Amino acid sequence: MKILLVADLESRYIWDYFQPEKFKDIDIIISSGDLKAEYLSFLVTMIKAPLFYVPGNHNDKYLKNPPEGCEDIDGKIITYKGIRIMGLGGSMRYNFGNYQYTEREMKKRVFKMGLKLWLNKGVDIFVAHAPLKGIGDGNDLCHTGFKSFYSILDKYEPKYFIHGHQHLSYGYQPERIKKYKTTTIINAYDHYILEY
């Protein structure tokens, strides 16, 4: 199964110079946040694959105008073709945005997922906007990752943890793919095609 991962930057390669043959094998699209609703609607229309998303810290407009034809998985677990996908959007709180959380608030969100995780016998892909604390995050408050995410990776060992928020263009984050125990961590910045 081919999964198109996107986050943070509307790819000119896809949006301005779309070539259908390059994406004809894509089975699903996953957005890790901070993309325009119009861009996500464009992707789901042109690629003809379901799109699942979590909001980023800059997606307050989604509250009034969510991406058309796409499915919000923030705080949910969905199963698609046997793959269990869980979403938790937002970033560390640094001002008063709707999709920003303190570590304590995110810990409560993670706790609320407990029953869903148990009923689904875990998760295969964990999608977030923010990275893990200490793995792929930044030094400033806005780009600090969440410690509470580790409890999901430690207990349920998803195959993949997908996040955005940390732009690879920042310079100090050159690696897109990292590893934590048995989980492969992928920064979805711009776009990346995952062979699941």
Image (cartoon, rainbow, N blue to C red):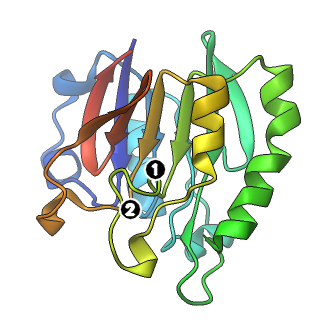
Residue 194: image location, x then y, percent = 31, 24
Residue 168: image location, x then y, percent = 19, 57
Horizontal side, residue 94 vs residue 43: left or right: right
Residue 73: image location, x then y, percent = 66, 43
Q: Which residue is mark 2?
A: 165
- Name the residue rendered at 33%, 68% in the picture: 138
- Name the residue rendered at 56%, 59% in the picture: 55
Taking depth in this image into account, of 134 and 116 the one nearest to the observer is 134
| Quarter of the view holding residue 34 | bottom left
Taking depth in this image into account, of 112 and 75 the one nearest to the observer is 112
- Name the residue rendered at 67%, 50% in the picture: 74
Q: Which residue is mark 1?
A: 32
Mark 1 is on which residue type? Ser
Horizontal side, residue 51 vs residue 189: left or right: right
Q: Quadrant of the C terminus?
A: top left
Q: Gap between marks 2 and 1, in whole Å?
A: 8 Å
Mark 2 is on which residue type? His
Eyeballing the image, is 9 above or below 180?
below
Horizontal side, residue 107 vs residue 132: left or right: right
Residue 64: image location, x then y, percent = 67, 73
